[in-house]
Amino acid sequence: MMTYEANPRYAAVGGTADQGWPPAIAALPAGPIVLALDGPAVLDWKAAIDGVRAAASARGRTVEPLDLRTYFTSWERILARTASAELPDDPDFATLAGGALSDLFDELPDPRPADDGLIVVYGPGAALVHHDVLWYLDLPKRYVEAAINAGTGRNLGQPEGTGRGTTKRLFYIDWPLLDRHRDTIAGRIDRWFDLQDSRRPTSLSGDTLRRTITALARRPFRTRPTFNTTSWGGHWAQRELGFNPDAPNTALGYELIAPESGVLIGDGPGRQVEVPFQMLVERHPDEIMGREARARFGTSFPIRFDYLDTMSGGNLSVHCHPQPDYMRRVFGWPYTQHETYYIMVGGTDRKVFLGLRGDVDVDKFHRQAHDAHHHEVPMDIEEHVQVLPATPHQLFCIPAGTPHGSGEGNVVLEVSATPYLYSLRFYDWLRRDSANRQRPVHVEHAFRNLDTDRLGEAVTRDLVQTPRSVDEGDGWAEELLGALPEMFFQVRRLVLDPGARLPAATGDRFHVLNVVDGDGVLVTTCAGDEHHLSYAETLVVPAAVGDYTLRSLGSSPVRVVKALIS
């Protein structure tokens, strides 16, 4: 039986990952040069420049450092230039930042090295300065978010003495600006560094990085999963997958979330780099997404897979997601957060909250939600929202505006649109965070987006669909589990008997697969690439793959969830 692989990795093409600063310094050209070290704001820049200086000194070269962070415009101007007109005083949300990283500078230096000089310009935006060699120093976003939460990291352009950094600015301002900048310069990066270990970073040459990305865009691959802890989190991923055994819980499992997921390239720990998945999509959108999806979504990979683990945990909040126009106008995303819940683990005695009751009094619901949030008055959410049994392997469709939440004791595979930061909470059971503050609730946002047209019997009729046959063959079947006119993707299920082979074709549309039951499958493409996929693992099948087959592994039937653009 195959086991869940927490660190899927792929070999570099035409090169290997180097460890430490000396190999990179040794590859620099002789003579006077300007070396630009670009990267995110939350990074151990001191350790980086110290490492570069020491490696250069060992080769007889003297470094003249130039900290580009000192060229940011004032913090007051940065706040003004990134202010959200739609959400000026919102404590939790901001409109996604537009514009460019260069907007945060009033002027830039023009360094010119002396004979045999080595000027090292470092900090976010270093690529904007005249340079001869460009290195990009990266840190996966999970570490950046942890630093902000711990109070050890500051936001983009934020000087010391101006308070703590916030995840609000990180999510909605910093990351959009930094990602846009990184993707713009990706084609001319001379070396990519992974600074998870800032003293001994790993790196790939830019050419090797681009060759590897090009190869991955034409074969199936997984992104590196990660699990986060929350107040309602359960322990399924710890018990069943062996993930984060020492963490308080494994509430949120990010299997594939384009803005945060990474792909591991290399031979193993100490000899690999983690590269943002979104950068792969930006470099090869037609190959990964397909031409039609690229025309609709640009280079935003539009589907995500993640887990909600409440085994021995608690209920999720009851919340909804923004209606399409509200999402565009207020939050700045061009498409909204439609979702589905696939019940991996549940039971008829477990709950899913979904949709309004037929006899709902929306005004009363609003008043009680307000009192719960502002006066900590408990409310009976079941007076307003329907409760359905969390039957294993049932799919629940959750279009924008639908109140919903998973109950305690479930493992939900969310197959959803990519936006993931817009849960507009009606009620969160008066829970408090680790600092004993009431967790954020967004009553007014939620009620502005509440769908009051679909309620009562229409909820179960439309959102709890019976599987329909799509195709079948010798020992296999394909079923449609959920599709709605307002949702741009559909969820299917592949069922394979032991040893069965199921033929598939992308038809210039990417597929995302997840094994929800059984040991796993072997995916083989028409080009001869193979990829094992075990229980609970998620696989991207790029549009460029074309024809491929799935062969079930093990002695029991296998069920695979498949998502694709409608």
Image (cartoon, rainbow, N blue to C red):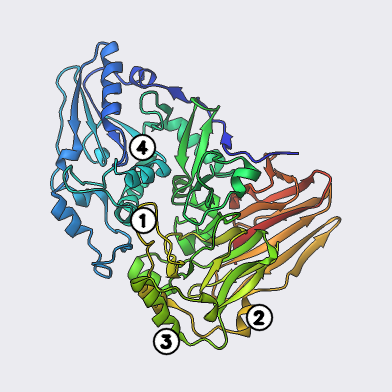
Question: Mark 2 touching mark 4, by CB under 8 A?
Answer: no
Q: Quadrant of residue 356?
A: bottom right
Q: Earlier in the sequence, mark 2 or mark 4?
A: 4
Q: Quadrant of residue 372?
A: bottom left
Mark 3 is surrounded, within 10 Å at the Cα level, by few (under 14), some (14 to 19) or many (20 or more) other residues, namely few
Mark 4 is surrounded, within 10 Å at the Cα level, by few (under 14), some (14 to 19) or many (20 or more) other residues, namely some
* Real-space Cα separation, disc 1 to disc 2, in angstroms: 41 Å
Residue beneath label 1, please? 436
* Real-space Cα separation, disc 3 to disc 2, in angstroms: 25 Å
Local SS, label 1: loop
Q: Nearer the viewer, residue 460 or 370?
A: 370
Residue beneath label 4, please? 188
Q: Which mark lies nearer to you, 1 or 2?
A: 1
In-image side of 521 versus 367 (left or right): right
Q: Nearer the viewer, residue 70 or 341?
A: 341
Instruction: Report the residue at 31% width, 17% height from top.
Output: 55
Residue beneath label 2, please? 461
Q: Which mark lies nearer to you, 3 or 2?
A: 3
User: What is the number of callouts on the image?
Assistant: 4
Q: Where 25 falls versus 104 (above or below)?
A: above
Residue beneath label 3, please? 363
Q: Is residue 220 visible?
A: no
Question: Mark 3 touching mark 1, by CB under 8 A?
Answer: no
Q: Which mark lies nearer to you, 2 or 4?
A: 2
Q: Earlier in the sequence, mark 1 or mark 4?
A: 4
Q: Where 460 falls versus 51 (above or below)?
A: below
* Three-letter amino acid code at the position of disc 1: Asn
